[in-house]
Amino acid sequence: MNNVIRCAILSTCLLSSAALAEANQAKSTAAEMFGAVPAVYDISLSPDGSKLAFIASGGGGITDLFVIDLSQAKQTPVRVTRATGDPENLYWCNWISNVRLVCEVGGRQEYNGDIFGFSNIVAINSDGSKLKLLSNYRRSVTGSSSGGSVLDWLPYEENNILMMRGAGGLSDYGWGVIKIDTTTGKTKDVERGRGEAVEYISDGLGNVRIMGMRIKEGRTELDSGRIRYFYRADDNSNEWEVLSTLDYANRTGFNPYAVDPATNRVLGFAPYQGRQALKAMALDGTAKTEVIFSHDEVDVDGLIRIGRNNRVVGVSYATEKRQAVYFDTELSKLATALSNALGDGKSINFVDSSQDESKLLIWAGADTDPGQYFLFDKNSKEMKPLLGVRPLVEKQKLAISEPVSYPAADGTMIPAYLTLPPDGSNNNIPAIVMPHGGPTARDEWGFDWMAQFFANQGFAVIQPNFRGSSGYGDDWYHKNGFQGWETAIGDVSDAGRWLVSQGIAKPSALSIVGWSYGGYAALQSAVLAPDLFKAVVAIAPVTDLALLKSESRRYYSGAITRDFIGSGPHIKEGSPAQNAATIKAPVLLFHGDYDQNVNVKQSRLMANKLKDNGKSVQYFEYPKLAHSLHDSEVRAEMLQKSLDFLPK
């Protein structure tokens, strides 16, 4: 069940995936196996359920689009097209008909010392013919060029889609909506472009019912972090009426996600009793609001949709594990049955379906399973394995990730995930605290390639959801992980102290490893508790809050970043680069110079500050790689260098 492509389905594979995986495993180091980027990271099912399209990594930044004809006796993956990664990558591809796909391609480029992102929407036949560009570039004040997005797949109008697109519609400026024939490129204007428009939502039937307009900060051109949403009362109305105002910074307001034409309501997320809940708002002018689903411990933050019309079938939330609540009784029973059949507590996601929903594309995975794709036929009740996400690690003995909690210094119990070596070692062993990025994020139960690598190498790994994390409501979020850094970093450091107090961690081999905000937390923990951690690994970290604010001023979103970071003594006190003299542990830094999330200047500054203060530091910079360092060779090198660096 764990082969990349099951020959039970693909009986005449050019090369058995099992043999391929085994051959690669035989010559791969642990760092190469765990560092390999996912073999499959986007997948879709044709409307009739007979074809599968997926994007696979071709190595060296290459991305390939493959198609498998499941109706043929010889079910061999056929490559449709390739993006070299210099600079284009394939992001996703979905079927628009049984023979044609719509894809997003994009990447990053350097111009005059700045990094610019770009994207385009294209259409292509499954045999690689009739490539058609569907986008027009829209140059924004941030310098990025976006080719727009698909708004509605119009499942009953073959080859047509609704698209949010920039210049070239009813207006020469701003986002508008067009209907476009993906074979000819012929367009029909649906909504005129508006300079402040940032979002449109259709009802899945081709009618645009919701529009989001960004709100500027005062008389400036800066984004205030607020969006005002408007709605149309029915399909025949041309008038936009105010629906809600969403304030991202203050976590207030209603955030619309999907229109339910059957009840003439819009579903979205909004605060409820200190946490996020799924609500419905009437689109008949009454503004009547109903709480559809809430949870008394965590935010409800996931909307489950299925099919080519994106039918809403449930919600999800994460406690110790992510839970799904299905409004669709049939899918609810099916999800339970499939999870039980697969065993090992696997999570089940409905990824895609045929147009009539008789065939379902399903993903299943767990902490000890990086994930598999299956095809389920409702009529025959048959489920066939298709593709594995990370074939190189499937035959490795993977470690169980256990939800735990530990006391912070003030007695607050902090939720976390503890991953111990698969050989059962749990006493006086090398250990790692691994804080997540964000900070407006949280760790969840499931497969984690970095935690699994270090556990495979004999480390205990704890991943704390410190205060400042999202997902646990407003009180837990506090002031966010920068303005409330003392609380957040205190919780992170206390995770290390707990590992020692439990006898799990060997005190002389306790380290901290983090990426993005996690890298910031790793460095700042070494400032706050300089004797606790014996080594620090920081990947693409924020290191100086003043620099982060000053860099953001060049962008339209600068006001959002400014307000998120705030002002006051914490700007200096909470910046590891400004407190490098306090750090005692050796530091290992990694960063890509095409990083648009955290500028590479942050790591360069940190390395220089540590050197100036006579501290031990190693810094590795990777050209033309973004924040995720999405390159198998680079990730393998990073894992191996980290392994060699950390005390055992």
Image (cartoon, rainbow, N blue to C red):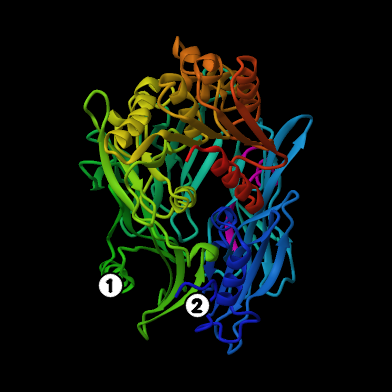
Q: Residues within 10 Å of mark 1 (few under 14, many from 20)?
A: few
Q: Is residue 171 magenta?
A: yes
**Tally of numbered discs:** 2
Residue 207 visible from this viewpoint: yes
Instruction: Establish if 129 lies above or below 630.
Output: below
Q: Residue furthest bottom?
A: 73
Residue beneath disc 1: 337
Residue 291 in the image: above or below residue 621: below
In the image, taking residue 380 as reference, residue 216 lies left or right, namely: right
Under circle 2, the secondary element is loop
- Residue 405: x and y in percent read 26, 39
Q: Which residue is painted at 33% across and 26% down in the image?
A: 478
Q: Main secondary structure of the magenta part?
A: loop
- Vertical comparison of 445 with 131: above or below: above
Which-is-in-front pick, marks 1 and 2?
A: 1
Along the viewing direction, whichever of 376 and 96 lies nearer the viewer: 376
Q: Give the residue type that dot 2 points to.
A: Gly
Which residue in the protein does label 2 denote?
Answer: 49
Q: Quadrant of the N terminus?
A: bottom left
Per the rendered image, the range of residues in magenta is 160-174
Task: Looking at this view, name the residue that lies furthest to the right.
Answer: 112
Q: Residues within 10 Å of mark 2 (few under 14, many from 20)?
A: many
| Amino acid at dot 1 | Ala
Residue 503 location, x and y as percent? 29, 39
Q: Where residue 311 appears, x then y in whole percent?
A: 39, 62
In percent of width and height, residue 181 lies at 65, 63
